[in-house]
Image: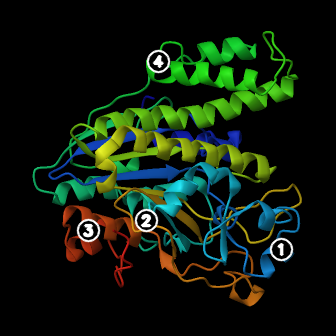
């Protein structure tokens, strides 16, 4: 990339729109070895996940008023969590984890990032783990790398997927290596050939492609190279396969290493920028997240009970839906936590309400919690990291607050 920095390159590519920041090809994977048997997985949800659609506050009467179309079937379709919140139906594969106490959420959380609502700045702040008092451009390392620096006898092995040479969350003095899936990205125009060839050279993805073909045929899709789909439908199939499949590939690789000597993993899942057609887009993204979590669980086996997974996003989305059946960039949102080490079966955080006066800027869900506090408390419980180091070195400026009791 010559003398261009990653940041300048991404800014120069802004003509590609928000989709670049949420691209399924910008998918780093990071792994680290650490003392002990506990495991931490951080999943960055790039594109700003709509927490009000994932963890639906059905008990708040304003939800239906702000989202007459998005929330029209929410009460009937949602999986009831606690009588107030309902879980998006696309997370149905994780219902068993919720019942077992291995799945939880936090609502109305955010980083200190406010008002500008840029994907790139928001993601940089999320990965840097700092506050608005520190210029993002001046931060050269990320909070996961800083965690490794305070952990005795910790070493790291970093892996990046196609399309990104650096991930701020692991930048810093701690040594890193790299891995990326050996994937073919030259797509066949025919769906069957596409599913068979996209990752033909990647053994991790080949079985997923074959399974996708079998699923499509079992659903009665017409036989033949195009499965009887229109060009638009084929493009939709391509996008769904890329996003859900890529998440499974990354989780597969991370899960295999976590089952051995790795203890900390981080990777990204794109596809959360839902300005238009949110109902369809968020279903695809949640399917990928569900696959990733279940793939990790499958590989971890007996280590699952000592594993905590936390999925975070750069910011939430507006309380009101827009005119294109989507939502725009907001402030507070939700986060997802899973794993046998998680004290799940509950939604953490203080609900601020959706009355207009209670909204941030009369448009966004009001933040009532710092998203950084949740991984910080997980680090304290899993690895014995002390509060002083977490609040000054790992997450500068963070007020940990009271222990929310995240670990079982």
Task: Decide which of tag 3 and tag 4 comes sooner along the chain.
Answer: 4
Residue at far bottom of view: 357
Q: Secondary structure at mark 2?
A: loop
| Residue at the (42%, 74%) spot, across then down | 133
Q: For the residues marked 3 and 4, what is the alpha-carbon distance in whole angstroms?
A: 36 Å
Q: How many marks?
A: 4
Instruction: For the residues labelled 1 and 2, say whether their Cβ atoms are less than 8 Å apart.
Output: no
Q: For the residues marked 2 and 4, what is the alpha-carbon distance in whole angstroms?
A: 40 Å
The residue indicated by pointer 3 is 381
The residue indicated by pointer 4 is 202
Q: Position of residue 85 (x, y in %)?
A: 65, 73
200 is higher (above) or lower (below) than 155: above
Task: Decide which of tag 1 and tag 4 comes sooner along the chain.
Answer: 1
Q: Which mark is residue 64?
A: 1
Task: Decide which of tag 3 and tag 1 comes sooner along the chain.
Answer: 1
Q: For the residues marked 2 and 3, what is the alpha-carbon distance in whole angstroms?
A: 30 Å
Q: Is residue 15 left or right of residue 256?
A: right
Q: For the residues marked 1 and 2, what is the alpha-carbon distance in whole angstroms?
A: 38 Å
Q: Which mark is residue 135?
A: 2
Q: Position of residue 254 (x, y in %)?
A: 37, 38
Q: Secondary structure at mark 3?
A: helix
């Amino acid at each position: 990339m010559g003398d261009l920095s990653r940041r300048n390159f991404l800014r120069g590519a802004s003509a590609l729109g928000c989709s670049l920041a949420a691209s399924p090809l910008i998918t780093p994977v990071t792994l680290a070895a650490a003392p002990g048997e506990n495991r931490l997985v951080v999943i960055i949800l790039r594109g700003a996940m709509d927490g009000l659609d994932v963890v639906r506050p059905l008990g708040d009467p304003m939800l239906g008023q702000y989202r007459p179309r998005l929330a029209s079937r929410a009460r009937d379709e949602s999986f009831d969590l606690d009588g107030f919140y309902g879980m998006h139906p696309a997370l149905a594969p994780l219902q068993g984890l919720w019942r077992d106490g291995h799945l939880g959420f936090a609502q109305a959380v955010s980083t200190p990032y406010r008002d500008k609502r840029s994907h790139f700045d928001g993601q940089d702040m999320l990965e840097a783990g700092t506050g608005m008092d520190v210029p993002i451009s001046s931060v050269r390392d990320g909070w996961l790398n800083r965690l490794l620096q305070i952990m005795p006898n910790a070493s790291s092995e970093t892996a990046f997927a196609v399309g990104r040479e650096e991930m701020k969350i692991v930048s810093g003095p701690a040594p890193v290596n790299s891995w990326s899936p050996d994937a073919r990205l030259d797509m066949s125009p025919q769906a069957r050939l596409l599913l068979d060839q996209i990752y033909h050279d990647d053994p991790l993805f080949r079985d997923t492609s074959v399974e996708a073909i079998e699923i499509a045929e079992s659903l009665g899709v017409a036989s033949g190279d195009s499965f009887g789909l229109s060009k638009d439908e084929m493009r939709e199939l391509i996008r769904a396969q890329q996003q859900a499949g890529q998440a499974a590939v990354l989780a597969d690789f991370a899960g295999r290493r976590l089952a051995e000597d790795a203890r900390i993993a981080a990777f990204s899942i794109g596809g959360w920028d839902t300005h238009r057609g949110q109902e369809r887009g968020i279903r695809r993204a949640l399917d990928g997240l569900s696959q990733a979590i279940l793939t990790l669980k499958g590989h971890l086996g007996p280590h699952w009970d000592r594993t905590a997974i936390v999925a975070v996003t750069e910011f939430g989305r507006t309380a009101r839906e827009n005119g294109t059946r989507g939502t725009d960039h907001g402030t507070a949102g939700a986060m997802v936590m899973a794993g046998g080490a998680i004290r799940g079966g509950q939604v953490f955080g203080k609900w601020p309400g959706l009355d207009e006066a209670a909204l941030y800027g009369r448009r966004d869900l009001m933040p009532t919690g710092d998203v950084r506090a949740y991984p910080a408390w997980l680090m304290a419980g899993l690895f014995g990291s002390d509060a002083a180091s977490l609040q000054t070195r790992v997450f500068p400026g963070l007020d940990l607050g009271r222990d929310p009791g995240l670990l079982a």
